[in-house]
Amino acid sequence: MKTDKNTAEYLIKLLEEHGVDYVFGYPGEQILPIYEALRKSKIKHVLTRHEQAAIHAADSYARISGKCGVCLATAGPGAMNLVMGVSACYKDNVPVLILTGDVSTDIKGKNTFQDLPLNDVFKPICFKSYNAHSPEKLENSINEAFMHFEEGITGPFHINIPKNIQSKPMNMHHKVIHTNIIKDIKESDIQDTIKCIEESEKPLIIAGYGLIYSDAINEFLEFVEKTDIPITTTWNARGIIPENDEKNLGLTGNRGTRKANYAAEHADLIIALGTRLSERTTSHINTDNIIQVNTNKEHDYGKTFYHYNVKNFLKLLNEKNFTKENFKWKNRINSKEDVKKPELEETDKLHPELVIQNILKHCDTNTTIVIDAGTIPTYFTTESTLEKSGQILFSGGLGPMGYSIPAAIGATYARHDDVIIAATGDGAVQMTIEELAVLNTYKLPIIVIIINNNLLGIIKQWQDMAGIPKFQVDLDNPDFVKLANAYNIEADNITSLEELNEKLDKAIKEKKPHLFNVEVADVHIPLPL
């Protein structure tokens, strides 16, 4: 039985049914039928100026909302421009759906215009990459991707759709495949976990962002309350419990707090919930007694690994009684205070650490900061205390330059009422600076702050530490204020903290796009303790 809808129209209908509100993308010849279906849809399309920006926007939208982010691109160069952002989502397990157009099936593989083996390209950086070579295959691919998301299996899912398939009538008389990926939780695994907790004298929870994606915050808070186990977080999960709450020791790992890293070093049991346990998170862990709960088998750390949805796992644990108390252990941890930071060196221009301290003074729980790669993540990590999850966003697993402005675009659609700040460097901003056009087109109240030292600062620092002369790190930058003005965006050069505080406060109140070019000194970022 065929419907009156073609496959592209049916695709958009499925996205609507799965609760998709926004799609970020860039049109092209091989995806025009989908764009025509989207034109008639209630789904809002956000036109970025580059496909890399589309996937970064979908990425941040998903990180904040917990919903699936969706992006669109055409075949060949359009699809290839997504690769950077898709790989960033893959490293951080962000739930995104990537739809690419492709050449028609009758000319596929014949080295025709824009024909590339897209599934071969996306397969290593996606949880799955589907080739929708028929209308039926497309429907099953969409259903399977969203079924993974619903079970808590997150990461990028790619569906490649040939142009001629998009225009074909949709055949409703076919078998729709439904498969459960995550098995039911064994009672023995719950009992073994309880036994480990009861026998432990120094347990520690490491909370990851998978708790957000699985909508498990309430279950997590109940588990922490019942067990009284101290918690630390991964970078992405910062603020999952406010960092000024005594239960939260803060970030663990390379840039971790002294309390968090002391706890990691001395714990005799680690309970890792929704985290892949990267080398930066595990840098201070000494015990092999690790229980990890994760829906992605690729993140099996090699200890006790439970391939379960963390929300369901915590629900069952919360049904049990716990008798363990951790007063002595918590007192030992709390006796460790952070080392006092050395005084800042005097500089001719503004010190970047002082600049970021002043930016943070203007931020509250209704502010979301999206940061770029380079020296900026260090300062925003060490200077901030977060009160909600996703309050500072960073693509930490890959760290692509140019993330902040397009990701700030996605953040505005996930948090309509927040002040959104894109904090970037003079090197990183030029990777995706064309997205200032999107801020102007949609009148997005994003404040772009460029920390400008006319240098690729972190690379120069690595060169200095290696004892080699600096090479290819000096930047001959454009006039960023004039550039912003060309996009009809107000902008200011900032050379003093008084000027920064006054104008930033005004920009926040105006709720309009604004760019600040803050001239700072070239100083080394502090190394991890």
Image (cartoon, helix red, strand yellow):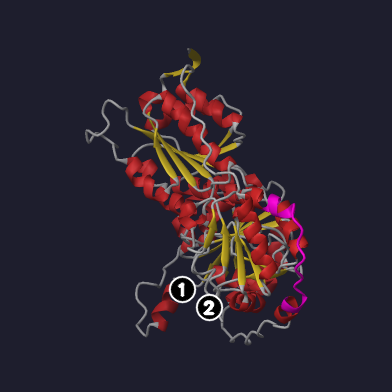
The residue depicted at 56 percent of the width and 26 percent of the height is 13
Q: Give residue 506's position: percent from left, percent from top.
A: 72, 59
Position of residue 27 relative to residue 473, above or below, is above
Task: Find the distance from the CA under tag 2 to the CA under tag 1.
Answer: 8 Å
The residue depicted at 72 percent of the width and 81 percent of the height is 332
Q: Is residue 123 shown left or right of residue 438?
A: left
What quarter of the picture does the C terminus occupy? bottom right
Give the quarter of the image for residue 131. Answer: top left
Position of residue 35 relative to residue 213, above or below, is above
Residue 46 visible? The answer is no
Q: Which one is in front, 205 or 12?
A: 205
Q: Give residue 353's position: percent from left, percent from top.
A: 61, 76
Residue type for callout 2: Ile
Residue 450 visible? The answer is yes
Q: Give residue 14's position: percent from left, percent from top.
A: 55, 28
| The residue stretch that appears in magenta | 314-329
Q: Which one is in front, 185 or 225?
A: 185
Q: Is residue 52 shown left or right of residue 257?
A: left
Q: Are discs 2 and 1 less than 8 Å apart at CB?
A: yes
Name the residue carrying label 2: 525
Numbered circle sitting on residue 458: 1
